[in-house]
């Protein structure tokens, strides 16, 4: 039993000495940046607290739509220009699942530039 304790103490000392020498991995986390210029046309999909959808183009008046009709409405508003960005903004009370359904619906219809709005903390 005594030799076993001696071996364990030697291993403990070895691990205590080598642990600070081990380098930790570095993870590059993406950051949110600001664009240098605003796109000429932006389509915004607004998910309300009641999970009803509205479309707004360039800050204009929002128009109501439904999830099955959403992709077709966005494609009409893009008018053949696939590079027009689509931004999803949701109320704080909306469930994550509702936002993901909207994003999934748009991506299934091959709508390219889909993003989420980020509200900066004051």
Image (cartoon, rainbow, N blue to C red):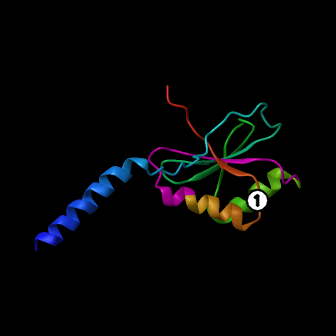
Report the span colored magenta: 81-99
Image quadrant where one finds the N terminus: bottom left
Using residue 118 as the reference point, say whether residue 49 is left or right of it: left
Q: Please provide percent x and percent y for residue 103.
A: 63, 59
Q: Please provide percent x and percent y for residue 53.
A: 60, 53
Q: For the point 50% across and 60% down, which residue is it?
A: 97
> Looking at this rendering, what residue extends furthest in the top direction?
122
* Residue 121, above or below 2: above
40 or 70: nearer the eye? 40
Mark 1 element type: loop
Q: Please provide percent x and percent y for residue 119.
A: 55, 35
Which of the 4 image quadrants contains residue 118? top right
Q: Disc 1 designates what residue?
A: 111
Residue 85 lies in the magenta-colored region: yes
Q: Residues within 10 Å of mark 1 (few under 14, many from 20)?
A: some
Q: Please provide percent x and percent y for residue 79.
A: 87, 53
Q: For the point 81% across and 40% down, which residue is it?
A: 41
Q: For the point 84% across and 54% down, which residue is it?
A: 82
């Amino acid at each position: 039993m005594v030799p076993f304790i001696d071996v364990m103490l030697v291993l403990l000392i070895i691990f205590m000495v080598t642990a600070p020498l081990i380098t930790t991995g570095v993870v590059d986390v993406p950051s949110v940046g600001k664009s240098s210029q605003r796109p000429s046309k932006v389509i915004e999909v607004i998910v309300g607290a009641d999970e009803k959808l509205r479309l707004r183009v360039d800050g204009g008046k929002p128009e109501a739509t439904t999830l099955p009709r959403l992709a077709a409405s966005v494609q009409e508003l893009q008018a053949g220009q696939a590079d027009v960005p689509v931004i999803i903004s949701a109320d704080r009370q909306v469930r994550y699942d509702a936002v993901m359904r909207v994003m999934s619906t748009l991506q299934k219809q091959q709508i390219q530039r889909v993003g989420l709005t980020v509200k900066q903390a004051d």
